[in-house]
Image (spheres, rainbow, N blue to C red):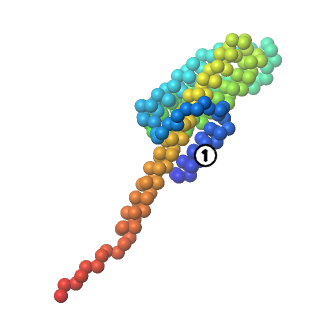
Amino acid sequence: MRAVFTFALSVLSLGAQTASPPKQSAPPIAGLETPWDARQIVAQVEKNDEKLRPVLANLNPQRWYDEKGAPSTYILQWQTAQQQLRDVAATTQLLEQKIESLPLALDLYFRLEALDVTARSLSEGAQHYADRATAEQFSALLAQNFTSRERFRDYIRDLAASTEQNFKVADEEAQRCRALLSQPPPRQARKK
C-alpha cells in the first residue's frame, strides 16, 4: 500500500514539474483541504468539463475528413473524447460521495489527464479544419480546465501525503504495541 502512495506522489510531483506552466507566486496551502473545500474543487473540475461537452459535440471531424481531407484519426479521437467525458462524469459522482478516497481521486485525475491529451489533439485539428470561433472557444476551455485540474492535483498530493502520514503513525503505534506484547511478563517476588 505504501508503494501506491509513493507512486502517486511521484506521478503528481512529476506532473507538476513537466506539465505546469510557471506559477504566479501564491501563498502555499498548508495541510489537507476540508471535505467541503475538496468537493468545491471537484465541482469546479466537473463544471469546466460540462462546458466542454457542447463545444466538443459541435466539432465535426467527419466533415473535416470528407470536405477538407483531415486525417481520419480525428474521428476516433472525437469519439474517444466523448466517452472520456462520460467516464469523468461518472467517476466525479463517485468521488463526491467519498471525497477522501485516494484511489477514486487518482482514478479521476488520470481520466482527466487522458481527456486532456485527446482534447488537445482535437484542438489542433480544430485549429486547422474547424471554424475559427469554435477552435478558439475549444482552446480557451482547455486552458480553463488546466487550472482546475492543477488545483485538484494539489489536493490529491496533499491527500496522499496525509494518508501516508496516517499509515506511518498507525504503523509506529502497532510496532510499539507488538513490542509491549512480546516482552516477558514481569517477575513477581515469591512469598516466603
Q: Which residue corresponds to the image point at 52% horizontal and 34% vertical from the top-left? A: 27
Task: Give coordinates of residue 9: x percent, y percent.
Answer: 57, 45
Residue at 56% over, 52% down: 3
Tell me which corner region of the image, top left, top right, bottom left or bottom right, holds residue 170.
bottom left
Please provide percent x and percent y for residue 120. Answer: 69, 26
Q: How many labels does the image show?
A: 1
Q: Quadrant of residue 192?
A: bottom left
Q: Where is residue 182 in the image (x, y as percent from the top left)?
A: 38, 70
For residue 80, side relative to residue 98 (left or right): right
Under tag 1, what secondary structure?
A: helix
In the image, is 179 to the left or to the right of 118? left
Q: Where is residue 80 in the image (x, y as percent from the top left)?
A: 66, 27
Instruction: Specify the amino acid type for callout 1.
Output: Ser
Q: Measuring 56% from the left and 28% from the top, which residue is drawn there?
A: 148
For the point 51% across and 44% down, which residue is it? 160
Q: Is residue 103 visible?
A: no
- Asked whether 34 or 53 is in front, the reply is 34
Farthest residue to the left: give it: 192
* Residue at the disc numbered 1: 10
**Label 1 Cα neighbours within 10 Å, binned few <14 / some 14-19 / many ≥20:** few
Q: From the viewer's perspective, is residue 58 above or below residue 11?
A: above
